[in-house]
Each structure stands twice: as C-alpha cells, then as structure tokens.
Amino acid sequence: MITLYGFGRIFREGIGETKDLRVEWALQETGLPYRVHALDHTAGELDSPAYRKISPFRQAPAIDDNGFVVAESGAALLYIAEKAGKLIPSDVEGRTRVTQWCFAAVSTVAPTLSLLGLGDIAGLNDNGRKTWTGIAKRWLDGLEERLDGREWIACQDFTVADILLATVLREVRNTDLVEPYPRLKAYYARALARPAWERTLALYAERFGVSVADIR
Ligand SMILES: N[C@@H](CCC(=O)N[C@@H](CS)C(=O)NCC(=O)O)C(=O)O
C-alpha cells in the first residue's frame, strides 16, 4: 500500500496551499489504495532523522510504496500514473507529451506564478512585480495557445500533467492574472470540477479541521 507523506499540521497561511494536495488528487483519480502519514510541520517532524531518509530536502509531499520512496510531487504523480496504468497513455509519444507538460508546469510556469501568488510576502517592489508579471504573461500566452481546440493540456484525455498544471494555476487563484485568458480559465474550472479533486479537498479539510470553503 502507498503511504502519502502529507501535512497534518502546518503554519496557518500554508493550510490549503501545500503540494500534497496534487498527489492525493492523483491517488483519488486512480483509485489506488493509500494511507496518509500526516506530518506535523510545526513540531519539526520534517527535520527528524526518520523523515530526512524519505525526503532529501526535508519537504513534503513524498510517497512510500512498500519501501520504494519517491520525493518531488511531479515524480510522485508520474509514478502513480505508471503504477495505476491511468492518467498517462501507453504509447511512447503520448507519455513523452505528458512528461513535457509536467516539466512545463513545474519548471517553467510554477516558479513565476508562485512568486506572484505569494503577493507581498515575496517582497517584490512595483518594478519587480511588473517584470515578473510580464514573464508570467509569456507562459500564460503559451498555455492559452496550446488550449486552442483542446480540452486537456497534454493529450486528449485528462492526465497527471493536468493535475500539475491546474494546481500550479491554483497558486494565483486570488489574483487576476488568468482573467485575460478565456481558454485557460475554462480549463482550470474544468479540472477543478472533477469529483476526485472535490474528494481530495474534503479529505484535506478534514485532516486540518477546517471547512472546504476555507481552502477552496
Ligand atoms: N519541489 C517540491 C517542493 C515541495 C514543497 O515546496 N513542499 C513544501 C510544502 S508545499 C514544504 O515541504 N515546506 C516545508 C519546508 O520546506 O519546511 C515538490 O514539488 O514536491
């Protein structure tokens, strides 16, 4: 059985923002059996010697499948898809397309959006915000173009690349960054309308003792 190392306690502002959400979403989509090890970040559990063996950078999420440990949310998603034979096609071109868009989400789009999503905490002055918004627009333009005539980002069917991209876009849900992008907005809404995402949010909210409305 897979153990998902996710959060059970974290500083208040982090609740609803952590990347264990995307891994649980993939687990919920595939139906693979799993349990959650709810880490107590506030008590320093991520810095414990036991957890250092699981996560090289002392971060969550990570998964442990009967002793096979995978850190990094993107890698965990790809492993879950491979293991389940779902959320990824079986042909090499299709799989590479999924890998391409997983990397696009986490290595191209995410760093810029995370910075902007952090708002004032990121410490950007007006000039910095302008520069990074310009860079974000370049990524969002590319996504908007890619979604012309497509329902999902990598393949015809929903894949783990969509889970990664939708959760990356979620980081700027409290900004107006995606407002000028109708296809991207519709794509984001389509992804988050999936029942597996709703179940994931409910399980997460229950773990933290908050309401789903607080973290949506
Ligand atoms: N690149 C990693 C990033 C993971 C990450 O940022 N984890 C954050 C929570 S979302 C964390 O563990 N923060 C606690 C810490 O760094 O002490 C991934 O995608 O899994």
Image (cartoon, grey):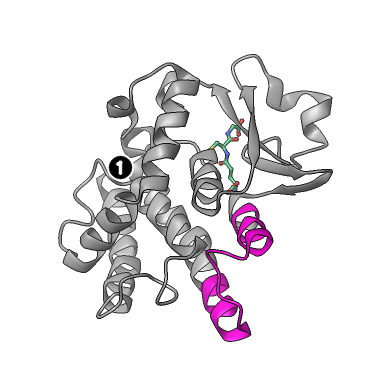
Quarter of the figure with the C terminus: top left
- Residue that numbered label 1 is attached to: 125
80 in the magenta segment: yes
14 or 201, nearer to the observer? 201
Q: What's under tag 1, amino acid-wise?
A: Asn
70 or 114, nearer to the observer? 70
122 to the left or right of 99: left
Residue 15 in sight: no
Above or below residue 93? Residue 163 is above
50 to the left or right of 73: right
22 to the left or right of 59: left
**Measuring 45% from the left and 38% from the top, which residue is drawn there?**
200
Q: Pinpoint residue 145: horizontal percent, then vertical percent.
A: 28, 78
Q: Pinpoint residue 63: horizontal percent, then vertical percent.
A: 69, 43
- Magenta span: predominant SS is helix
**Measuring 67% from the left and 42% from the top, which residue is drawn there?**
62
Count all numbered tags in the image, as a single digit.
1
Q: Pinpoint residue 204: horizontal percent, then vertical percent.
A: 46, 30
42 in the magenta segment: no
**Measuring 50% from the left and 22% from the top, which residue is drawn there?**
207
**Measuring 64% from the left and 50% from the top, which residue is drawn there?**
72
Q: Secondary structure at mark 1?
A: loop
182 or 140, nearer to the observer? 182
Q: Which contiguous range is marked in magenta?
A: 76-100
Q: Pinpoint residue 203: horizontal percent, then vertical percent.
A: 46, 30
Above or below residue 189? Residue 21 is above
